[in-house]
Image: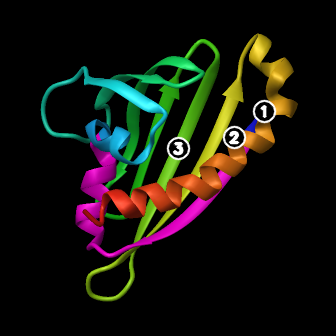
Amino acid sequence: MIHASWQARVDRPPEEVFDYVADLANEPQWNPDASNIVRTTDGAIGVGTTWEEDFARVGHYVTRIDRYERPTLLSFDARNPRTDAYVTFTFTAAGDAATDVACQVTLTMHGFMRVLEPLVAPMIRRQMETARPRTLTAALSR
């Protein structure tokens, strides 16, 4: 398994940041690896909402919200034949109009990807931990 974590401060209230991250249609704005995102369930976004999305170098995911505690806790369970991803966000008010975002990611490799895991883990971890806080903050600053 590969574990990564990162933190960012965003100059927006927790409810706005939570709603933005919870809607995966926004993900390509702050995660350049995500594309072709299609919501596959109707109704309000919450536990059980699913999307299908393509992810660079890994392929097609089916992603489902499995925890939705607005505006403090959100997690996604993303499944793919090569790699499963479990992503948890926490949102904490930081003053009147800012939010501290913390993200923890666990990737579980399957098949041939497990052989590559020791080689790719440092690169994946570094990319997530350095790029994602910067790109999320930039996307929400527009």
Q: Is residue 54 left or right of residue 7?
A: left
Q: Amino acid at mark 1?
A: Val
x then y, percent, for residue 19: 25, 54
- Magenta region: which residues? 3-23
Looking at the rendered image, the disc whose residue lies closer to the viewer, 3 or 1, is: 1
Q: Is residue 78 magenta?
A: no
Give residue 124's mark: 2
x then y, percent, for residue 8: 49, 68
**Dot placed on the residue nearer the N-terminal end, 3 or 1:** 3
Q: Is residue 89 left or right of residue 121?
A: left
Dot 2, how many residues are within 10 Å of its Cα: few (below 14), some (14-19), or many (20+)? Answer: some
Residue at horizontal 39 percent and vertical 30 percent from the top: 64
Dot 3, how many residues are within 10 Å of its Cα: few (below 14), some (14-19), or many (20+)? Answer: some
What is the CA distance from the residue labelled 2 to the residue labelled 3? 14 Å
Q: Secondary structure at mark 3?
A: strand
Q: Which residue is mark 1?
A: 120
Residue at horizontal 71 percent and vertical 47 percent from the top: 125
Image quarter of the C terminus: bottom left
Which picture quadrant has residue 120? top right
Q: Is residue 141 above or below residue 80?
A: below
What is the CA distance from the residue labelled 3 to the residue labelled 1? 18 Å
